[in-house]
Every structure is written in C-alpha cells, then in structure tokens.
Amino acid sequence: MQTHNAKRVAVIIEAVMQSRLTDAMENAGVSGYSVLPVLAGGGRSGNWSREGQIGRGQGMVQVICIIAPDKLDDLLNKAFAVVEKHIGVISVSDCQVLRAERF
Amino acid sequence: MEGMLALAADNLLSPIILFFALGVLAAFARSDLSIPEAIAKGMSIYLLFAIGFKGGAAVADNGIDATLILSLVAGLVLSFAIPMVAFALLRVMTGLSVVDAAAVAGHYGSISIVTFVAATSVVQGAGLDSEGYMVAVAAVMEAPAILSALWLIARFDKGTAQMDAGLMREILLNGSIVLLVGSFLIGVITGSEGLDLIAPFIVTPFQGVLCLFLLDMGLVAGRGLREARGVLKPGLFLFGVVMPVVGSVFGLLAGVLLGLSPGGIVLFMTLSASASYIAVPAAMRVALPEANPSIYLTLSLGVTFPFNLTLGIPLYLAVASFVTGG
C-alpha cells in the first residue's frame, strides 16, 4: 500500500497550558490532534503523580499530532512560544501515513 | 486556656483529623495507598456542591440583609490586601525571590475550601450557628489574590507576569467557583424545601466523604512534603505557621466589625488564614511559570493546611468565643 512521509509531533506540557498549545497548533495548520493524560513523572522540577490530585495546577498532558513535513517549522515555532517558559518536552519523529491529504 | 486546650484535643481526635494524619503517615511510610484522581475530583465536587447548597438554603431561611453585602465586600478587600502583608513577611522572613514571594503571597490571599469545610464541621460540632452566606464570601475570596500577586510582580520585578483575557476567564470561571456559587444560588432559590429533598445525599454522608477526602489530602500533602524536603527552609516553615495566624487576625477584625455570629467570625478567620492549593497554583503556573511550584505547594498544602486543620481552627474558635464573650 502507498504511504507518505509525515512528521509526528508529541508535546508533553502542563495541563493548564493545554488549550493554549492546541490553539497554537490549530493556528499552525494542524488538522487534528489527540490529548493523552500523563500519569506521573519526574524531572528538573521534581517528581509528581496524578493520584489524588484535584486541581489542574500539578498535572501534565501529552498532545500528539501528525503534520505534513512542510508545515513543521511553523508548528514548532508556534508550539515553542507556548512551551518555552513552562515545564515540557517537544519531540519530533518521522512517520508514514496512508492519506496524506488529511495532514 | 484550659477550654482551648480541651477544644484542640477534641479536634485532634476527630475522625477528619485522624484520617488526614493517616494519609500523611501512609505517604511518609511510602505505602501504596492512593485515591484515584477521578474519585478525588468526584469527592471535591460533592463537597463543593453540598457546602454551597446548604449555605444557600440557610440564607433562604434567614433572608438577605446588608451584612451579607458588607461581608462580601470585606472578603474581597481582604483577598486583595492579605497578599501584600504576606509578601512583606516573606521578604523579611525568607530569602525568596520577588517572583517566588509574590506567587506564595497570592496563595495566602486566596482560600482553601477544604479548610473552610472542616471549620464549618468544627463550628457545628461546637454547637455554634454561622451565617450561611459565608460560602459566598469564600467564593468571592478565591480570585482577587491572584491579581494582587501579579500586581506585586509588576511593581517589584518590572513585570514578568503573563496575564491575558483567557487567564482572567479561567480564574473567574474556574470549576470550583462556578459549582460553589451555582449550588449556593440554587440553595437560595429552593430554600429548606429543596434541602429536605436532597438531605439524604448532602447531609448524612457529608462527614464520611469529608473523612475520605481528607485521607486523600493527607496522602497528597505527605507526598509533597517527602518530595520537597529540601525546599522547606526554617524561615519558610515559620512563615507557613505564622501567616495563617496573621491572616486570621484580619478575619477576626472583619467579623467583629460586621457583627457576625461567633461561628461566622470563626469561618471568616479560617478563610483569611487558609491558603489556596487548587485555583491559585493553576493560575500561577500560567501567569508566573518562573515561580517554583514546589515552594508554594509545599507551604500551602504541606504546612499551612495541616496547621489550620489541627491547631488553627480550634485556636480561631477559642479566640472568637473569647472576643464575643461566648
């Protein structure tokens, strides 16, 4: 089956910044994304866990999208403007998709 | 003095405090005991719904008067003003940067609704009446302190805070404020008849749910303290204990000037003494990402919350009883 090159961008970010990040992604031409809860983690700011938490101040989420390679730079610039001062990680990997026109 | 000690001892041996202590001990002992996030959120929704509705029903029974309006204004003023006092104390007592001190100060001007709920329970246990509209005062005191913290940053750090219309909407319409105010208004509209209809759900199980919720709070506080031991310097710890007492004095003055009942004064003191760990941390993460969350969360949830729960509330009850001659 014919496949096409695409980029998979995964951003782990503080839950309170989720809507700001997805707004930036939409502005960069992302046609769809998924948001996953992050259960627990640790890093430069210490360890944390979702268990028992009642506020959004402490949680993290992962936002994943697939995008055409030519839109990647614009997306990264806009996403980084949101993530820059906050706890988070942006990673990019190559992937293959079947319906390139959707991305 | 004897009465106050007896009150403190009774409070320390109440189920809600003992369950909180169990949570802290379990966290320190690295037990795998945990409350799933969804259940913890469900319990917090239940408590906000129940306390808001009961407060509204009480207002419906007693009517709306000028003291209600003045109490709301006093709550608003205190929430704006207390961060200034906290900021000054932090700069004197600790070596915190302007950004961290302003972020912590914002937490102390806002309120902890769980501390308020626990105080309501203690006030009722002591056989005191309180004004039902104190729930509305609690809601009013949630957000203004955030603006004070951002003003402190603008004034003393040449403005590094990020404030936009989206954040303002999130602060004013955060879920706990909407539920608390909404339940309060429904309680006012439906009155005691409405309360009778749902009493088996919001009155009888209330203390049990509160115990379970405080077990969760103990677990979260204990884990936070364990993870942030290095952050908690002596000056900061002292601030976490002194600031609630300072705040409670402002609440006492407001309550006495407004002519509130002894129970109402205790609740005003508790609101002024408590520190937020739900609404303000979320706002600070957006507006002041440079501020260290370990500092404000550990102080608010790991020091001030347990202090208020164990010693603070009995102290405020004793002082309010003494001042009002009760």
Image: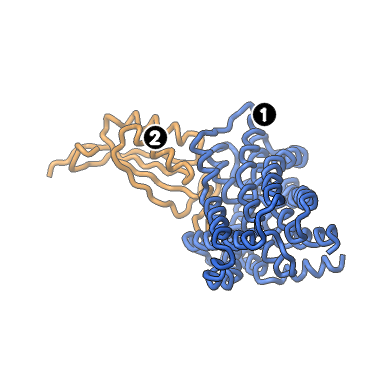
Q: Amino acid at mark 1?
A: Arg
Q: Mark 2 falls within which chain?
A: A
- Residue highlighted by disc 2: A24
Classify residue B325 by image quadrant.
bottom right
> What colour is chain A?
orange
Depth check: give the residue in front, B318 or B192: B192
- x and y, in percent, of residue B31 in the image: 56, 66
Say whether residue B323 is left or right of residue B314.
right
- How packed mark 1 is, by other alpha carbons closer than 10 Å (few <14, some 14-19, many 20 or more), is few
Classify residue B218 by image quadrant.
bottom right
Residue B16's disc number:
none
- x and y, in percent, of residue B1 in the image: 87, 64
Classify residue B194 by image quadrant.
bottom right
Task: Look at 63% across and 29% down and name the residue there.
Answer: B154
Q: In the rendered image, which quarter contains the C terminus of chain B? A: bottom right
- x and y, in percent, of residue B271 in the image: 69, 53
Chain letter, blue: B
Task: Look at 78% across and 68% down and name the residue there.
Answer: B7
Task: Look at 73% across and 41% down and name the residue there.
Answer: B90
Mark 1 in CB contact with mark 2 (< 8 angstroms): no
Residue B155's disc number:
1
Same chain shared by disc 1 and disc 2: no
Residues at marks 1 and 2, CA–CA distance in whole angstroms: 30 Å
Depth check: give the residue in front, B137 or B61: B61
| Residue B246 visible in the snapshot | no
Q: Amino acid at mark 2?
A: Ala
Q: On screen, A79 above or below A43?
A: above
Task: Look at 77% across and 38% down and name the residue there.
Answer: B92
